[in-house]
Image (cartoon, rainbow, N blue to C red):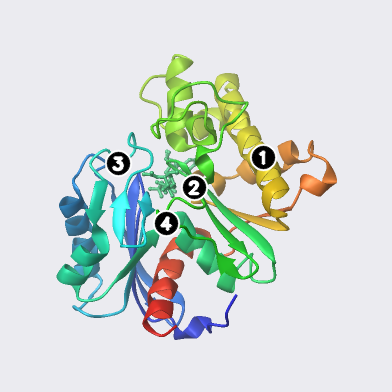
Amino acid sequence: MQNMPRNTLTGFAADLGGTKIAAARIEQGVVAERLITPTDAAADPDAQIAAIRTLLDRLGHASGAPLGVAVAGRVDSAGSWHAVNRGTLPAILGFALEQALVRDLGAATCLNDAAAAALAEGLFGAGSRSNSFAYLTVSTGVGGGLVIANRLIASENGLAGHVGFVSSRHASGPCGSGRMATVESIAGGRGIAAAAAAAGHADTDARAVFAAAAKGQDWADRIIATSASAVATLIGDLTAILGLDTVAMGGSIGLAPGYIDRARAALAEEPALFRPRLVPATLGHDAPLIGALAAHLRKESP
Ligand code: ADP
Ligand code: BMX
């Protein structure tokens, strides 16, 4: 990607996902301080901005300081924010996010969380030497960002890269996007929790399913194996479309111990041509934060 020295990144970033909001003060490309709070998934956009602002205030953000904001959901070219999965963020139905951030915080750029992470990994991480790169987050949902021939793929409606909404032979139920049997509906955190409930374990989130699998519980192990298989099939499909050479995995599920090994084992069943290099995100949980600030600074001085 276009050269941007990592040490030129100084400012603030926020990352609003379906489960948690993270905010950070970034100095010379490194997260110097980070705060995390749970997402109130049902909250309206003004309340979401207020939650971000509370964290930024505590980090010493002053109006007009460089700020990148990564959010779950699509952000269109006018800076409006829409949930694609209405089950995850039901009150985000088209809101002028960039305008509101600039009004409340002085300066900001916003983009999808997985797109931000893909940008960061493409510039500074696992994708920096790749010609055809995908970042996948397995978290509340399954998100994606694509960096092909050194460009982050974007569409005017902000939907490009939403790879979690691809159909999956591992899935069968409805998805909050309105589609049926998507990768996200079986492999993401909400899908894992739904599978646990269907197996008789109500009120069990994905983290608890991983804990049960670690204790040797078969029902939990099967659910995680299905998630990893669905993600591996998605990687094979994306490779057929885009000729991927490298995929980086992020998100609390993607980075959970053992998950990437399961995905690699499932990917090993694909023919070699459909098997890109699969690695954990080099920047780990910092990727969306670093990418959001990078997007802002690139926009300010392209
Ligand atoms: P967000 O989706 O808000 O970006 P995360 O990347 O933390 O947030 O993903 C949230 C999902 O990850 C939830 O479904 C949660 O249960 C699950 N999770 C969080 N921590 C872990 C963990 N240590 N192991 C497995 N799953 C986890
Ligand atoms: C969903 C979708 C994406 C997002 C991805 C990861 C919504 C609300 N979210 O596919 O926009 O990038 O989840 O988000 O439509 P996270 O909440 O898992 O971090």
Q: Does the residue labelled 3 lie within 8 Å of ligand 2?
A: yes
Q: Distance between the residues labelled 4 and 1?
A: 21 Å
Numbered-mark total: 4
Point out the residue furthest to the right here.
Answer: 272
With 287 as the anchor, is 246 left or right in this view? right
Q: Where's residue 12, x and y in %?
A: 32, 73
Amino acid type, mark 2: His
Distance from mark 2 CB to nearest ligand 2 atom below 8 Å: yes
**Residue indicated by mark 1:** 232
Residue placed most toward the observer, 6 or 46: 46
Q: Distance between the residues labelled 3 and 4?
A: 14 Å
Q: Earlier in the sequence, mark 3 or mark 2?
A: 3
* Residue at numbered disc 3: 89
Can residue 134 be seen from the camera position used here? Answer: yes
Give the mark nearest the N terminus, 2 or 1: 2
Q: Earlier in the sequence, mark 3 or mark 4?
A: 3
Could you say which disc has been placed on residue 113 in the image? 4
